[in-house]
Image: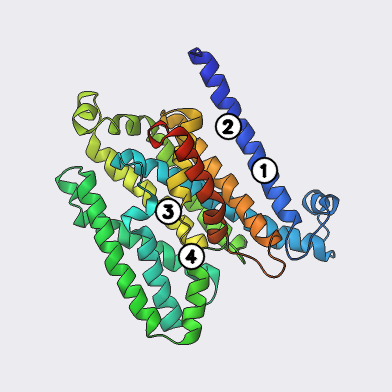
Amino acid sequence: MASVPARFARRRLGIVVLIALVVISVFVSACFGTRDIPIATTWQAIVAFDPESSEHLLVVNQRIPRALVSVLVGLCLGVAGAVMQALTRNPLAEPGILGVNAGAAVLIACGIAFFSLTEPVDYMWLGLLGAALAGAAVYLLGGVRRGTNPVRLVLAGAALTVVLGALTQLIIINGLEEVFDRYRHWMVGSVAGRGYEVLLPVGLLAAVGLVLAFALARPLDAAMLGEDLSRSLGGSPNRVWALAGVAVIVLAGSATAAAGPIAFLGLAAPHLARLVAGVDHRWVLPYSGLLAALLIVVADTLGRVIPPKGEVSVGIMVALLGGPFFVYLVRTRRLAQL
């Protein structure tokens, strides 16, 4: 067994490698799309921007912010998923379990159907509001004020998700054809058209959520032992649940508002992180966020490169690429080891 300093050095090296891979994937993502741009031109667009060059404008104003939004969405979903699995002590938990996705979906459906909204930035603000309201409702319905009970909270989230999902379908089915067309493009999860107007507010919210989640890394280790053991170790389960819940709502709400509901990342990334870094949440959280960020940027790039015409939404590509790989890991290493 490796010594503690050796494990620390190995995990720190892994973080550095993952950050480097994310940076490289962002650069590669800026090179490819419906119109491929040479690597040298892409580099020049970053270090010596020429506003007269259409290729430089494409890289700086569209592809770089799109790739950075993907990184933020991955970081948010990866960290939120790790926090949710620790809180609920459930390896199948993911951020949507708090009804965040359903809350965002119903308000965005209302915005499209009743106010004819079409811009991603409008979807973002409505999505944030819907996610926050749904998360607060799940906390109240789950009776968190009466104590921490993962089962009660999960059931409240599942029930609210069903109700909000039915309400969303009711709005879409009774809307015009263009309402359904706009909604389905958001529903599959996409970062197309996301620019700096989305990147900046989502970046600020993501920073708040990430700082809060990382500050709870050690309390999450205690929370995984159960409420009684956590109290015996000097922890405050109710405070941890409240703060971690806020972190999940901010992170998952920001990601869903920016890119729509993207499944799988919040579920699989924490398992992959524990496979690499162990169970200490000081390492699980950054590993989970970076792995999710790397996967979503790669998926978005491939979604633009593989189809001969048009592009495949990142939500679909993440599921197509990540699902089989996750099943392979489960079959070869057993879920308990993950």
Residue 176, horizontal then vertical, whole percent:
45, 87
Identify residue for label 1: 23
Residue 208, horizontal then vertical, whole percent:
45, 46
Q: CA distance from mark 3 to mark 1?
A: 23 Å
The reply to whether the C-beta atoms of the residues labelled 3 and 4 are less than 8 Å apart is: no
On screen, residue 220 above or below 138 = above
Residue at the (47%, 82%) spot, across then down:
179
Q: CA distance from mark 1 to mark 4?
A: 25 Å
* Residue 15 numbered tag: 2
Quadrant position of the C terminus in the picture:
top left
Of badges 3 and 4, the one in the foreground is 3
Task: Tell me if mark 3 has few (under 14), some (14-19) or many (20+) residues whose alpha carbon lies within 10 angstroms of its own.
Answer: many
Q: Secondary structure at mark 2?
A: helix
Residue 112, horizontal then vertical, whole percent:
45, 78
Q: Is residue 126 left or right of residue 63?
A: left
Identify residue for label 4: 124
Of badges 4 and 2, the one in the foreground is 2
Q: Earlier in the sequence, mark 2 or mark 3?
A: 2
Examine the rendering and report whether any part of residue 208 can be seen. Answer: no
Q: CA distance from mark 3 to mark 4?
A: 12 Å
Q: CA distance from mark 4 to mark 2?
A: 30 Å
Give the residue furthest to the left: 146
Identify residue for label 3: 252
Q: Earlier in the sequence, mark 3 or mark 1?
A: 1
Give the residue furthest to the front: 331
Amino acid bearing label 3: Ala
Amino acid bearing label 4: Met
